[in-house]
């Protein structure tokens, strides 16, 4: 398993070629942005300001590290666990918050950000990412695509289809698996008999890499290599980023009935943003003042984001049906009128 960040004690710190202080601090800012988005979103959910929310606490290093290895023109295919990944491309926080509010202001054009729609059905975006990447290759466009999915997704047919296709067609795609060791309440041991998820890559003829998912620099480095391979025409890479889900699956989940609380506590103490922060403080790249300023900036962004999302006028309920039917059923007008009556509109 690849690691770069040490523990400040027995395990020595490494470094990544080509990353100077400016890049290291930009990466830190991205981590803090995602962490702040996530923590504020749990609060907004509890306040009834956004709907059910998929928490990504302790997944930030996988998202920030891998996206940092991409060019702006490369495309990202997120699952619900990476809902806020667009922030790393400059997407407004209000857009992502609107998505979680079920408001059309949260529908973005993937072309604008190189970020596909958030995919909730498990693994169904893997073939989309592979198809997109293969299409780019056919057009001699050197873009690559990355698909994010979980350990549970590797048991899905869509993952198998996408990975098979990627291997055979040498699609310039990175299959990025966040192995947080849980698929809601299903533990990894019940998910697969394979010793590691990276082992699955062999069957598709794809290189499989294992990396510490809590080590943002190791994730960055592994993804940078995968991007270089893809761009050079050498095809896909499967990255298994090993981590641990240190929060509920989503705000509607109660993990206390299936998870070991001591293990969660241990993981929370070793969470990925703190690990990188301590690394940067040890190596003298970051100061305590910079830590505070970065966190304040992210909090401000979130305050403005939720205010903007809440200022959106209510959505027209008719939108729910607008693209649902080629031939609307005769009862549609009546049904819509009833919905509007229920909603008080
Ligand atoms: C096709 C499909 N089947 C079932 C579900 C219900 N479901 C939502 S999340 C989830 C677990 C997925 O686990 P994993 O792939 O490990 O991703 P994680 O949530 O851990 O990031 C399931 C089964 C779904 N969304 N889509
Ligand atoms: Mg999982």
Image (cartoon, rainbow, N blue to C red):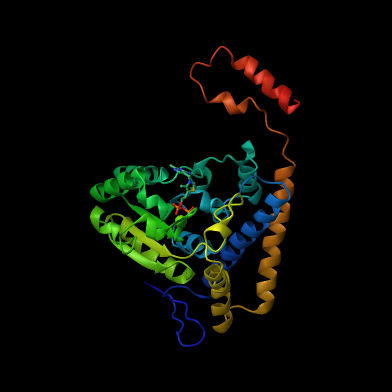
Closest to the observer, 291 or 316: 316
Q: x, y (%) of residue 275?
A: 54, 74
Q: x, y (%) of residue 245?
A: 51, 62
In this picture, is 20 found above or below 49? below
Closest to the observer, 85 or 247: 247
> Could one spot residue 143 in this view of the protein?
no
Q: x, y (%) of residue 26?
A: 56, 67
Residue in the image at 46% along x and 42% along y: 121
Residue in the image at 55% along x and 50% along y: 83
Q: Tell me the quadrant of the picture where the C terminus can be found.
A: top right
- Farthest top residue? 330
Q: Is 279 left, or right, of 193 in this rendering?
A: right
Q: x, y (%) of residue 88?
A: 55, 57
Q: Tell me the quadrant of the picture where the N terminus can be found.
A: bottom left
Q: Is 81 left, or right, of 286 in this rendering?
A: left
- Farthest bottom residue? 10
Corner quadrant of residue 242:
bottom left
In this picture, is 263 found above or below 127? below
Residue in the image at 50% along x and 75% along y: 20
Q: How many numbered markers are drawn? A: 0
Closest to the observer, 286 or 214: 214
In this picture, is 293 found above or below 149? below
> Could one spot residue 69 in this view of the protein?
yes
In this picture, is 324 found above or below 201? above
């Amino acid at each position: 398993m690849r690691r770069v960040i040490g523990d400040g004690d027995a395990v020595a710190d490494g470094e990544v070629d080509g990353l100077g202080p400016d890049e290291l601090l930009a990466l830190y800012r991205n981590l803090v942005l995602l962490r702040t988005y996530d923590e504020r979103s749990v609060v907004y959910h509890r306040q009834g300001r956004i709907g059910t929310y998929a928490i990504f606490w302790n997944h930030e290093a996988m998202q920030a590290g891998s996206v940092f290895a991409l060019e702006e023109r490369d495309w990202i295919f997120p699952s619900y666990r990476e809902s806020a990944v667009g922030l790393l491309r400059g997407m407004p926080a209000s857009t992502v918050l609107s998505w979680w509010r079920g408001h059309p202001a949260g529908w973005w054009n993937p072309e604008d950000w190189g970020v596909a729609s958030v995919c909730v059905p498990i693994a169904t975006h893997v073939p989309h990412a592979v198809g997109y990447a293969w299409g780019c290759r056919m057009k001699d466009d050197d873009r690559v695509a990355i698909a994010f999915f979980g350990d549970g997704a590797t048991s899905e047919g869509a993952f198998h289809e996408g990975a098979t296709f990627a291997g055979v067609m040498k699609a310039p795609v990175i299959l990025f698996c966040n192995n947080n060791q849980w698929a809601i309440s299903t533990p990894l041991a019940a998910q697969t008999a394979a010793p590691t998820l990276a082992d699955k890559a062999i069957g598709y003829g794809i290189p499989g890499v294992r990396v510490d998912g809590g080590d943002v620099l190791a994730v960055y480095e592994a993804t940078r290599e995968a991007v270089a391979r893809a761009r050079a025409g050498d095809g896909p890479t499967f990255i298994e980023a090993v981590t641990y889900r240190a929060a509920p699956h989503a705000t509607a989940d109660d993990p206390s009935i299936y998870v070991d609380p001591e293990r969660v506590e241990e993981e929370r103490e070793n969470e990925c943003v703190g690990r990188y922060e301590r690394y940067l403080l040890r190596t003298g790249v970051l100061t305590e003042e910079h830590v505070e300023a970065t966190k304040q900036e992210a909090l401000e962004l979130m305050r403005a984001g939720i205010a903007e999302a809440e200022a959106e006028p209510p959505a027209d309920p008719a939108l729910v049906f607008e693209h649902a039917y080629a031939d609307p059923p005769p009862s549609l007008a009546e049904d819509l009128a009833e919905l509007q009556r229920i909603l008080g509109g």
